[in-house]
Image (tube, grey):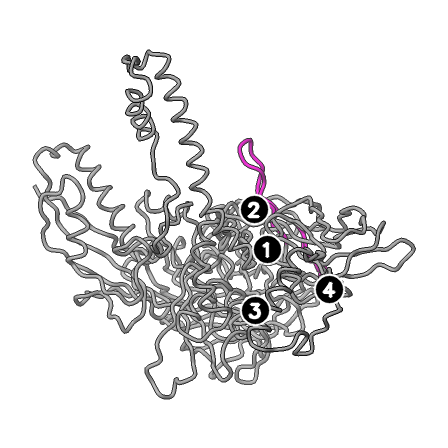
Amino acid sequence: MDLNFLPKLPKANLDDRTYDDLIQECLLRIPRYCPEWTNFNPSDPGMTLVELFAWLTDQMLYRFNQVPRRNYITFLELLGVRLNPPKPAQVDVTMYLSASLPEPYTIAAGVEVATERTDEEEAVVFSTNRPLTIGIPSIRHFLSAQAIENRPRILRDRFSGTWSLRPDGEWEGLELSFFDERPQPGNCFYLVFDSDAPIAGNVIAITFKGEGATSTGIDPERPPRRWEAWNGKTWESVLQQESDDRTQGFSFSEMTRNGGNPLGGADVILHCPPRWIVETFSTYRGRWLRCVCAEFQDDRPDYLRSPRIVGLSVRSIGGTVDVTQSTRINNEILGESNGNPGQVFQLQSTPILPREDGEYLFVTPIDGVPQQWREVSDFSESIATDLHYTLDSLTGEIQFGPLIREPNQLRGRTKAVTESWRESRGRPQGEDGEDEGEEVKETQYGAIPPRGASIMMASYHTGGGLRGNVQTGTIRILKSAVPYIARVTNYEHALHGADAESLESAVMRVPKMLRTRDRAVTAEDFETLAIKAGRGSLARARCLPSTEKESAGTIELLLVPQIDPRTLDKAIERVQGISPVNLSVPEPLVRQVMDDLNERRLLGVEIQCREPQYVGVSVQTEIALEPEYGSSVAQQDILHKLQVALYRFLNPFIGGPDGKGWPFGRPVYSSDIVTLFQSIRGVRYLGTIQLFEFRYQDQSWQRNLSREPVISPGDFGLICSWNDPQLRSNHVINLMQ
């Protein structure tokens, strides 16, 4: 570890001589002490001894020069600085039933799922964070509307008078159309589910029975419709992939081609949101699901006529639950107490994740009642009767309170200095209420388990690290059999896993820690404490300045999540940007930061946390190369280097002029691109550079011809090269002849 970042105060260098300096110094002393020695060739045995002496002295000097580093680390230990443990990755896992169940089924929390083990890598284990209940869904209302509304008011009941509910839960009746006879964008229908059924987070299969093979005029591979569910704030997409719609936009095209009968029904598999609340719109109450006729596009045919059905039913086929990269260990016996202060016990598995309810230490004295001890960060405020212990999350060491003994020699010197100070000020001995006859020889901080007591850790979690950021579809193994569960999978990447903090990172954060002292007052305090509260899940934080009078007393924080550096480097080398899903900050992480900051803010200060505004950038330019790079292989190589440099430069994590992430609110100019490209070897000159911006509006990316610059400082956003299928225009670099 290099300490060059510290302030350069005058200090004595222990010894700055190098190996060559030592040899030269020995050679200069030879004529004085041994003038008859004249052969200084490397083959001379005396030169071998000189080189050996220089090597041994150089090693000794190297050890001497490590003293300042050791002293600095010792100072950090006195401050109570600990390295942050790894951060576990999190992701949603979907569990599918082997068959439909007649009653609601609950899967307990703590079920372990994992990736497949290979010859090179161990399996990555995840555990469910909460119970998952797979309910029995029931459709109560089928409603339609001519125009889409965020909170529907004008609704038409399509079941009334024409359809009936069978005992098995299936609706049937006369032929029913979803949309207008000539469907228009915004036509939609709503399915309202029974509010008493616990189906939030369930995977449901809605079976539609069609009236023959009626053509709808659409492209069955890309039907112009979307499925959404109301989560209490907005309408959330619930169709995971197009292949889950086996009706192919209610056209039943593939079923008809394969000789099937649409009257037998086809399923649409939907993933209900975990927060699927009960809501009342108009006079109807329940959990709301809708299908919207999407806006027509030139390259996608629209509906020529409305689809029609004659039957409708629903069933649950699984559920989605959030999991964390962790393994629970219960009732681990650590050993017996020997009755001495400062005992240390070692947990078998490391590192240890943040403790949850029910994770504590049991101490059982001989012929006594088990005692529940409490974990503390240190023993500074513990007295001899407090049942306290400390647990190092990184090493897994459990330590009990120490016994501090003051040496008699030190106590005597302290007393002599005190008496000398009193005499110099004319004060009598023993003034200020001091008891001259009382001597405190030792102090116990925290209780000591009695001799022979059994030490047991009731429960703890282990896991975490970058290896937990697994790819889509890699979690497929159930560590233990769960009744009625056939398979599991993850439809998203696992995010927010981080390795343990390095010593260098801890050294860099100590000055900020000393400035804030766990008190959020200045903007820098809020940013530093927010990143600390993220425990490795946040890469950056920005505290916005307050400019309006009505916002006085309100602190607005922008949070940028952490991304696996290895995944980021691979994406850049493949000439890909960042997917917007990787830039979202999960709600549990926001609550975690808010809870931590609320304990450190000033009274009357309100804190608001949100994601920054990201601005996607597209660059179009022409580049001329030097004549010697005229071959097609050289041109492709330079073109790849230009694209990699562009994706790396326009990056909120490792981009910007200093390579530490694009600064908040900093504009991007054409001159930035010119400077970047001219540093690539082989580039002769550049043509016109055009910058385009993308902004996320109305659930789609809007591409606009940008002004110069792309972003204004008032936006407080971050520049980013997007990787999203909705952005059909990437960085275009044409080579001029």
In the rendered view, does 594 fall on the left or right side of 482? left
- Find the magenta span and give its range: 98-127
> Callout 2: few (<14), some (14-19), or many (20+) C-alpha neighbours within 10 Å?
many
Q: Which residue is mark 1?
A: 323
Rendered view: 373 above or below 141: above
Between discs 2 and 3, the one toward the N terminus: 3
Q: Nearer the viewer, mark 2 or mark 1?
A: 1
Q: Quick check: marks 1 and 3 in contact, CB under 8 Å?
A: no
Q: Of all residues shown, which one is farthest toward the bottom?
A: 550
Disc number at residue 604? Answer: none
Q: Nearer the viewer, residue 319 or 386?
A: 386
Question: Disc 3, disc 4: CB below 8 Å?
Answer: no
Of the two numbered discs 2 and 4 in the rendering, the one whose residue sits closer to the viewer:
4
Indicate the position of residue 390 as horizontal and vertical percent values.
67, 57
Query: Quick check: 311 above or below 50?
Result: below
Pinpoint residue 603: horizontal percent, then vertical percent: 51, 83
* Residue bearing the label numbered 3: 275
Q: Are marks 2 and 1 in contact (CB under 8 Å)?
A: yes
Q: Which mark is on residue 475?
A: 2
Q: Are marks 2 and 4 in contact (CB under 8 Å)?
A: no
| Residue 103 among those drawn in magenta | yes
Residue 10 visible from this viewpoint: yes
The Cα atoms of the two marked residues, 2 and 4, are separated by: 60 Å
Foreground of the two, 376 or 568: 376
**Quadrant in the picture for the N terminus:** top left
Question: Which residue corresponds to mark 4?
Answer: 440
